């Protein structure tokens, strides 16, 4: 049976949380799970916790945000490095669930081509794959088995409040 492609996208908070919730569910059923967090380089609360649980979770970005053109190369290089590792995992069919957190941002910022991701998804065989990010193309929507859009209604960031440890990272 072919693995499912699940997408969480939108401008709202909770895409990563939804994907990680699915990962925890799979772990509870003794599934093998790998999580790749593209464009992220900071050790967040969820990263620290999952590492303690011996979950394969990888930070696939530099420790700084992609804010300037000068940051692009560092982000692109990290993305390409870890995307190659994802390809190997899929080729060897080593996991039951693969979370590609923020991979849609990597495509949006042209760190990798969408065609590379689509090609990879088509080789998934039995692996279930979760994608997260802000925007999703029609091609990826057509390929997906399940899509959830997460919209922002209200957020304390709008009032210039800073990210809160334990809630946002």
Image: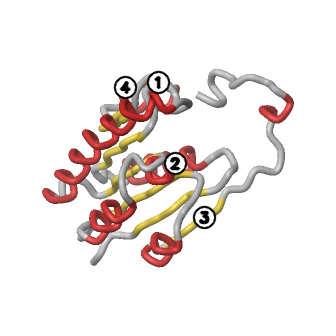
Residue 116 rendering spot, x and y as whole percentages: 30, 61
Q: Secondary structure at mark 2?
A: helix
- Where's the N terminus, which quadrant? bottom left
Q: Circle 4 is placed at which residue position?
A: 52
Q: Circle 1 is placed at which residue position?
A: 42
- In-front residue for pair 120/128: 120
Residue 125 rendering spot, x and y as whole percentages: 24, 70
Q: Earlier in the sequence, mark 1 or mark 2?
A: 2
Q: Secondary structure at mark 1?
A: loop
Snapshot quadrant of residue 63: top left
Q: Earlier in the sequence, mark 3 or mark 4?
A: 4
- In-front residue for pair 96/57: 57
Q: Secondary structure at mark 4?
A: helix
Q: Circle 3 is placed at which residue position?
A: 148
Q: Circle 2 is placed at which residue position?
A: 21
Q: Earlier in the sequence, mark 4 or mark 1?
A: 1
Seen in the picture, residue 83 relative to 150 is either above or below; the reply is: above
Mark 2 surroundings within 10 Å by alpha-carbon count, few (fewer than 14), some (14 through 19), many (20 or more): few
Seen in the picture, residue 158 relative to 149 is either above or below; the reply is: above
């Amino acid at each position: 049976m072919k693995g499912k492609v699940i997408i969480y996208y939108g401008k709202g908070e909770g895409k990563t949380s939804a994907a990680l919730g699915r990962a925890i569910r799979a772990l509870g059923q003794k599934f093998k799970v790998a999580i790749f967090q593209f464009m992220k380089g900071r050790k967040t609360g969820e990263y620290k916790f999952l590492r303690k649980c011996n979950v394969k979770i990888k930070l696939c970005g530099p420790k700084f945000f992609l804010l300037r053109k000068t940051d692009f190369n560092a982000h692109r290089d990290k993305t390409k490095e870890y995307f190659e590792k994802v390809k190997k995992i899929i080729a060897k069919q080593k996991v039951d669930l693969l979370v590609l957190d923020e991979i849609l941002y990597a495509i949006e910022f042209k760190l990798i081509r969408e065609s590379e991701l689509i090609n990879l998804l088509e080789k998934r065989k039995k692996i279930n794959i979760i994608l997260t990010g802000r925007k999703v193309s029609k091609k990826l929507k057509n390929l997906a088995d399940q899509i959830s859009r997460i919209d922002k209604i209200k957020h304390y960031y709008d009032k210039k409040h800073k990210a809160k440890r334990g809630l946002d990272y």
